């Protein structure tokens, strides 16, 4: 079983701004998520993008500390990341639930944190040994 601590440092992000998930922009989604999360604290490697429940995309990222992961959830969950243009197009209506950035601790969101090394070549050695 994975050490509990690792799941507490992992966060799952959903509900990305439209501009981030447009076909032309998808390739840089991990970098965009990474730069957003790094405002809160250092993260381990680039976030991994996968299909989330309901068909949308989700990103899984690992902070270096559980404190940073908590801070990120507190600070970023529910924020309106729409661009000025998107807000204008919506007549400055408040964001719908689906337009608010969604960020949760992975273990609390019921998301299984894959062992480092599964699909993340940039995982550092100590992490890869976490399942031992």
Image: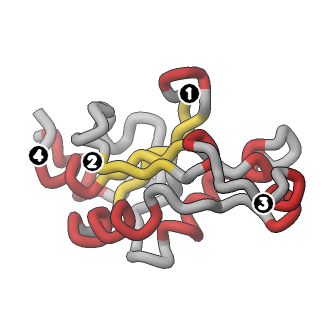
Q: Nearer the viewer, mark 1 or mark 3?
A: 3
Which element type, helix, strand or loop, lies under badge 3?
loop
Q: Nearer the viewer, mark 4 or mark 3?
A: 3
Residue that numbered label 2 is attached to: 128
Q: Nearer the viewer, mark 4 or mark 2?
A: 4
How far apart in space, not on screen, are marks 4 and 3 (Cα)?
Answer: 45 Å
Q: How many numbered discs?
A: 4
Residue that numbered label 3 is attached to: 92
Name the image quarter holding residue 36. bottom right
Q: Nearer the viewer, mark 1 or mark 2?
A: 1
Which comes before the other along the chain, label 4 or label 3? 4
Q: Residue at x 49, y 78 (%)?
A: 39
Which element type, helix, strand or loop, lies under badge 4?
loop
Q: Is residue 5 left or right of residue 117?
A: left
Residue that numbered label 4 is attached to: 3
Q: Residues within 10 Å of mark 3 (few under 14, many from 20)?
A: few
Q: Considering depth in this image, is 117 or 63 the residue closer to the camera? A: 63
Q: Are marks 4 and 2 in contact (CB under 8 Å)?
A: no
Q: Are marks 1 and 3 in contact (CB under 8 Å)?
A: no
Which element type, helix, strand or loop, lies under badge 1?
strand
Which element type, helix, strand or loop, lies under badge 2?
helix
Q: Residue at x 70, y 51 (%)?
A: 17
Taking 61 as reference, is 1 above or below it?
A: above
Which comes before the other along the chain, label 2 or label 3? 3
How far apart in space, not on screen, are marks 1 and 4 (Cα)?
Answer: 25 Å
Q: Position of residue 56 (x, y in %)?
A: 61, 30
Residue that numbered label 1 is attached to: 51
Name the image quarter holding residue 28. bottom right
């Amino acid at each position: 079983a994975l050490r509990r601590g690792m799941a507490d440092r992992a966060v799952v992000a959903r509900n990305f701004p439209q501009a981030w998930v447009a076909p032309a922009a998808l390739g840089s989604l991990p970098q965009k998520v990474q730069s957003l999360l790094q405002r809160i604290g250092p993260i381990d490697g680039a976030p991994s993008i996968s299909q989330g429940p309901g068909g949308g995309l989700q990103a899984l990222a690992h902070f270096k500390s559980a404190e940073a992961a908590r801070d990120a959830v507190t600070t970023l969950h529910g924020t309106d990341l729409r661009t000025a243009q998107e807000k204008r197009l919506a007549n400055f209506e408040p964001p719908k639930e689906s337009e608010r950035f969604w960020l949760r601790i992975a273990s609390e969101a019921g998301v299984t944190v894959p062992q480092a090394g599964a699909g993340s070549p940039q995982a550092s050695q100590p992490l890869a040994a976490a399942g031992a």
